[in-house]
Image (cartoon, grey):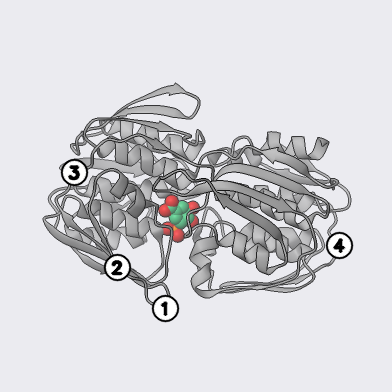
């Protein structure tokens, strides 16, 4: 069993290297595999989740060569995937299974997608429903919309789909299926959620119609099928969801100064910066002037005192993956932090509301769970504890960040899951502890 052992550290003064963005790495491998021609992807996140996508695309006929650290050369299939010879293993990755559902749905092939114990409990009905309406045939072998998923794809009808939840994975699955359906496929998102699929599909030569968001961020996205993707080179920036751990550690520890270069600053992902600034954090984000579909730049965070805030409503999809570590920020802040409208956290790699609330309480924080979030009465001193992460990478890393502020030793057990998104987290953590 791998574990992290953490104790309180002094001010953190460091320049940290943040690994590639997970959402963009998945999409780069998928889109380059669908495209006509050869693409080179750099900055790719070599973590288990994204490697599940690489292997899945290989099993569907793409030729993918690993030519250097974070670099993959992908010979696309021109949109014609082949029948996989065995199960397509999606590992722990919900993004792989949900986006692939949309891709496979439109191909004249059969595929059976499997996942680990955590993925096997996650809801797939949200993609099965619209894709079935388009004409694909799904069997959720786990019952109640749960994996393994057997998909029989074929020629699809276009669909106008009003999404019940603001999910980038559902939006992506429907748009990807719509690429091969004859006519206009559209998705309405109830609140803005990450738009990497829209940005990156356009990079790969697809024409999309992007509606104007209303006051709540509700927006329609449409495309006319059939459309083909064209190969292109793509540089994946650093993952702001991985930088998030150091943003919280750096802003709550007085005297700290942490610099992170080349981090993604997509406005549908950078909500953590606004939330922490609202809590009093000193963060500067300077976009670099490169002209790419996905903005990125340098983030500098300086330590100080935080105060509580409310995180709710349309802001939630923007910080959905950062909420566990923002809960840690809430425990370190003075005053009350309220997280609501975040019921989605209950169906992530684990029930993240229960997991983070339980871990923070074990360390002495005052946290009350609600159905769709939590109330954190901040500022109580934290003490070391032995924490479980329930096979959830973000729970493991959030526990480690809390440990940097606790008296005594904090041990986070079974941290192998961190390899799904941030394999170098442990090394960076050690460098911070020893500095
Ligand atoms: C992701 C979308 C989000 C996010 C996940 C990655 C993506 O999930 O939590 O980590 O890459 O599209 P939902 O679409 O379920 O909100």
Q: Which residue is mark 2?
A: 211
| Percent coordinates x, y for residue 221 in the rendering | 28, 63
Chain-order first, disc 4 or disc 1: 1
Quarter of the rendered structure image containing ligand 1: bottom left
Q: Image quadrant for the C terminus?
A: top right
Is the residue marked 4 within 8 Å of ligand 1, measured from its CB? no
Secondary structure beneath label 4: loop
Chain-order first, disc 3 or disc 1: 1
Please, is residue 129 above or below residue 10 in the view? below
Secondary structure beneath label 2: loop
Q: Nearer the viewer, mark 4 or mark 2?
A: 2
Q: 10 Å neighbourhood of mark 2: few (<14), some, or many (≥20)?
A: few
Q: Badges 2 and 3: C-beta atoms under 8 Å apart?
A: no
Chain-order first, disc 3 or disc 4: 3
| Percent coordinates x, y for residue 432 in the rendering | 77, 39
Q: Which residue is mark 4?
A: 381
Q: CA distance from mark 4 to mark 1?
A: 40 Å
Residue at image coords 31%, 41%: 31
Q: Nearer the viewer, mark 3 or mark 1?
A: 1
Q: Nearer the viewer, mark 4 or mark 1?
A: 1
Q: Which residue is mark 1?
A: 215
Q: Which residue is mark 3?
A: 228
Q: CA distance from mark 2 to mark 3?
A: 22 Å
Residue at image coords 86%, 62%: 381
Q: Residue furthest front?
A: 289
Q: Quadrant of residue 322?
A: bottom right
Q: Badges 3 and 4: C-beta atoms under 8 Å apart?
A: no
């Amino acid at each position: 069993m791998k574990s992290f052992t953490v104790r309180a550290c002094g001010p953190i003064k460091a320049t940290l290297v943040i690994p590639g963005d997970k959402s963009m790495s998945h999409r780069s491998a998928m889109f380059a595999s669908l495209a006509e021609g050869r693409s080179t992807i750099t900055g790719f996140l070599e973590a288990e989740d994204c490697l599940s996508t690489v292997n899945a695309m290989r099993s569907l006929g793409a030729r993918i060569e690993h030519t250097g650290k974070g670099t993959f050369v992908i010979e696309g299939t021109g949109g014609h995937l082949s029948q996989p010879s065995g199960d397509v293993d999606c590992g722990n990755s919900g993004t792989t299974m949900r986006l692939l559902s949309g891709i496979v749905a439109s191909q004249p092939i059969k595929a059976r997608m499997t996942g680990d114990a955590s993925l096997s409990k996650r809801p797939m009905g949200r993609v099965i429903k619209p894709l079935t309406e388009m004409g694909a045939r799904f069997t959720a072998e786990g019952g109640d919309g749960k994996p393994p998923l057997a998909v029989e794809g074929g020629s699809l009808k276009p669909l106008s789909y009003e999404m019940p939840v603001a999910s980038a994975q559902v939006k992506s699955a429907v748009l990807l299926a719509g690429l091969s359906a004859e006519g206009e496929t559209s998705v309405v998102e109830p609140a803005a959620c990450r738009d990497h699929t829209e940005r990156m599909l356009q990079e790969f030569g697809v024409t999309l119609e992007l509606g104007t968001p209303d006051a709540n961020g509700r927006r329609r996205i449409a495309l006319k099928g059939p459309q083909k993707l064209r190969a292109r080179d793509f540089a994946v920036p650093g993952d702001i969801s991985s930088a998030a751990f150091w943003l919280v550690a750096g802003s709550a520890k007085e005297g700290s100064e942490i610099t992170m270069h080349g981090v993604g600053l997509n406005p549908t992902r950078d909500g953590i910066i606004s939330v922490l600034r609202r809590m009093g954090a000193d963060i500067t984000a300077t976009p670099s002037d490169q002209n790419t579909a996905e903005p990125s730049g340098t983030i500098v965070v300086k330590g100080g005192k935080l105060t509580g805030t409310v995180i709710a409503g349309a802001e939630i999809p923007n910080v959905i993956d950062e909420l566990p570590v923002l809960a840690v920020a809430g425990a370190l802040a003075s005053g009350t932090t309220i997280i609501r409208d975040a019921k989605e956290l209950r169906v992530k790699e684990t029930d993240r509301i229960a997991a983070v609330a339980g871990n923070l309480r074990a360390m002495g924080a005052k946290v009350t769970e609600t159905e769709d979030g939590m109330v954190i009465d901040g500022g109580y001193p934290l003490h070391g504890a032995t924490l479980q992460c329930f096979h959830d990478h973000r729970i493991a890393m959030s526990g480690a960040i809390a440990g940097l502020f606790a008296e005594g030793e904090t041990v986070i057990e079974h941290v192998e899951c961190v390899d799904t998104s941030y394999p170098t987290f442990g090394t960076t953590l050690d460098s911070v502890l020893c500095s």
